[in-house]
């Protein structure tokens, strides 16, 4: 979040209140702005204005730069989780996933020839002068835009001047629940990504009270609890507050019950992804089980984004086919393919580039920037399209598959291997994996780990998982991935390589924030 000045607030307001193209809204409604180029909060005192602001939650996370959250930010997470690879320097993609070194099957070591380790590159590119090319500010900016909009709605509701039709109390409660849910989501993302963050509860204002990530996560959970407390009103606004674009034959508009479940699943995520697996106590596992048991049990009313190639031809996000084409932005990591069982039907969502004469894999590494970017795999279907087909255009903020896999992990840790195996089977059945049942007497943890890789692919969780499992720690401290598939520069497929990632567990506060909002006298985390 940049320090908010009046002029910037006006720009944000114009963006939030100008979302008149959402197909759930009455485009004939006149907000009666005396100056349409300078809207003020007073327009929100109409029910129609509040509807538009609610629909704008989905847009607010991308106000800073088109597709910056649902594409660029999610790409950072998937790159650091080694689910995808890219050699391109745009938005610092290649530096965000700069590995420390790779040891090949023959014992030879590859060290990237350009740049330093990932921590060094993050420090170098955490620079306000880079503007949209600064990777550290992307998620921070998106989430504080979202939080700021929620603050605006809460302040408007607390003002008591909104004129509602029908059951005014229920509608006000519903919009309040929605606002607290999005604040909880914003703080969850900030606290799960950055060393420190800010708790801001006033629209258009900021502060210098930087708090450690665990305190930000605690605030996220508090906001989710407030959403649950007010959730009874969601059913009164669900037809108005959620754009028709974000529903399909499976996922409908959120209900009171589904918002409560989604909030509980997010609280479970907050616990799991911010605690190292080795540090989880029996009490932690029991808390995780308790939360997931009241979390999402299906995706019928969860929060998603979908593309619309007609209304928003440029807003195709992850599923933009050009991102996965022969000369696109990303390829699928060899390590992700390695984690998919050969008889898993979902392997058909990917295709391997091979030599027509020899049948051998052809590795994609434009400009030859290092073997860490080598991959012979790309998306073939399901994740890539330029048209609005239901299967291929959904991105989940949170899903029931994630909830079931968290519950499975808790059940396993609590000694219930058979229950854990059944939960993994449920996810695979839902996703049409066509795999045999998981053997409770086998390595159920490995089944959970690999299922989170493929079953939650592109849902922004792979970095969190690699971090909590210790994979991103320096190899000398027990981190790294062994037995890894790596294609070297000769085209040889190594199957027992060791990758030393040595990534930062949490990112620093963006320079773009500190340049305008530096704490006076330091902060709890020592920011000077």
Image (cartoon, rainbow, N blue to C red):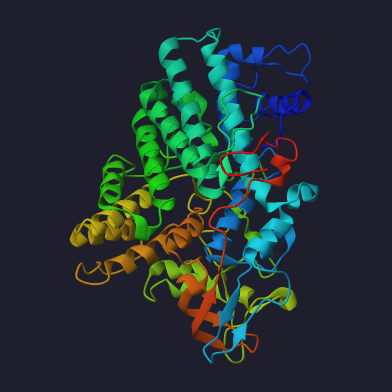
In the image, farthest residue toward the front? 521
Q: Is residue 136 above or below residue 429?
A: above
Compared with 88, 256 (above or below) is: above
Q: Residue at left 64%, top 16%? A: 29
Can you say which quadrant of the picture contains the N terminus?
Answer: top right
* Residue 40 in which image quadrant: top right
Q: Going by the image, does 225 lie left or right of 371?
A: left
Q: For the C terminus, which image quadrant? A: top right
Q: Determine the image quadrant of residue 90.
A: bottom right
Where residue 65 appears, x then y in whole percent? 71, 43
Q: Is residue 154 left or right of residue 115?
A: left
Give the number of callouts. 0
**24 with respect to 424 (left or right):** right
Seen from the viewer's position, the closer of residues 246 and 423 is: 423
Residue 67 visible in the current orientation: no
Residue 185 position within the rendered picture, expressed as x and y whole percent measured from the top left: 49, 38
Residue drawn at (23%, 72%) of the image: 442
- 456 vs 137, nearest the viewer: 137
Residue 382 visible? The answer is yes
Name the residue: 49% across, 53% down: 459
* x then y, percent, for residue 348: 46, 70
285 with respect to 179 (left or right): left
Tell me residue 275's x, y (percent): 40, 52
Q: Nearer the viewer, residue 487 or 55?
A: 487
Answer above or below: position of 481 versus 215: below
């Amino acid at each position: 979040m940049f320090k908010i000045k009046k002029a910037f607030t006006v720009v944000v307001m114009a963006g939030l209140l100008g979302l008149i193209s959402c197909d759930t809204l009455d485009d004939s409604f006149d907000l009666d702005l005396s100056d349409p180029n300078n809207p003020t909060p007073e327009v929100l005192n109409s029910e129609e204005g509040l509807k538009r602001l609610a629909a704008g939650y989905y847009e607010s996370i991308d106000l800073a730069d088109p597709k910056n959250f649902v594409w660029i930010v999610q790409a950072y997470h998937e790159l650091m989780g080694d689910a995808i690879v890219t050699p391109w320097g745009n938005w610092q993609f290649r530096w965000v996933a700069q590995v420390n070194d790779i040891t090949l099957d023959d014992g030879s070591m590859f060290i990237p020839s350009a740049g330093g380790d990932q921590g060094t590159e993050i420090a170098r590119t955490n620079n306000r002068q880079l503007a949209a090319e600064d990777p550290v500010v992307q998620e921070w900016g998106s989430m504080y835009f979202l939080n700021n909009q929620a603050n605006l709605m809460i302040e408007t509701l607390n003002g008591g001047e909104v004129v509602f039709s029908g059951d005014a109390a229920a509608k006000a409660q519903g919009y309040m629940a929605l606002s607290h849910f999005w604040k909880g989501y914003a703080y969850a993302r900030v606290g799960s990504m950055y060393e420190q963050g800010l708790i801001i509860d006033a629209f258009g204002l900021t502060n210098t009270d930087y708090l450690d990530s665990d305190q930000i996560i605690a605030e996220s959970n508090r906001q989710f609890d407030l959403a649950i407390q007010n959730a009874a009103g969601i059913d009164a606004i669900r037809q108005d507050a959620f754009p028709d674009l974000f529903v399909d034959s499976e996922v409908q508009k959120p209900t009171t019950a589904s918002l409560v479940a989604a909030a509980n699943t997010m609280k479970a995520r907050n616990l799991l992804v911010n605690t190292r697996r080795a540090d989880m106590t029996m009490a932690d596992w029991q808390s995780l089980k308790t939360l997931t048991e009241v979390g999402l049990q299906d995706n019928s009313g969860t929060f998603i984004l979908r593309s619309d190639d007609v209304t928003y031809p440029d807003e195709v996000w992850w599923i933009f086919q050009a991102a996965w084409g022969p000369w696109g932005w990303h390829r699928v990591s060899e390590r992700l393919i390695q984690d998919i069982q050969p008889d898993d039907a979902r392997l058909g969502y990917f295709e391997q580039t091979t030599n027509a004469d020899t049948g051998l894999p052809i590795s994609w590494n434009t400009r030859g920037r290092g073997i860490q970017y080598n991959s012979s795999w790309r998306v073939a279907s399901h994740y890539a399209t330029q048209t609005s087909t239901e299967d291929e255009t959904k991105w989940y903020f949170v899903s029931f598959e994630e909830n079931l896999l968290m519950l499975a992990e808790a059940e396993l840790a609590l000694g219930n291997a058979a229950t854990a195996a059944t939960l993994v089977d449920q996810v695979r059945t839902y996703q049409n994996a066509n795999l045999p049942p998981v053997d409770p007497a086998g390595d159920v943890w490995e089944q959970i780990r690999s299922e989170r890789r493929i079953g939650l692919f592109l849902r922004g969780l792979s970095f969190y998982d690699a971090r909590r499992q210790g994979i991103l720690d320096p190899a000398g401290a027990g981190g790294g991935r062994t037995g890894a598939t790596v294609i070297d520069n000769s085209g040889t497929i190594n199957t027992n390589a060791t990758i030393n990632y040595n990534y930062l567990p949490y990112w620093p506060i963006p320079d773009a924030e500190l340049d305008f909002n530096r704490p006076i006298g330091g902060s709890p985390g020592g920011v000077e």
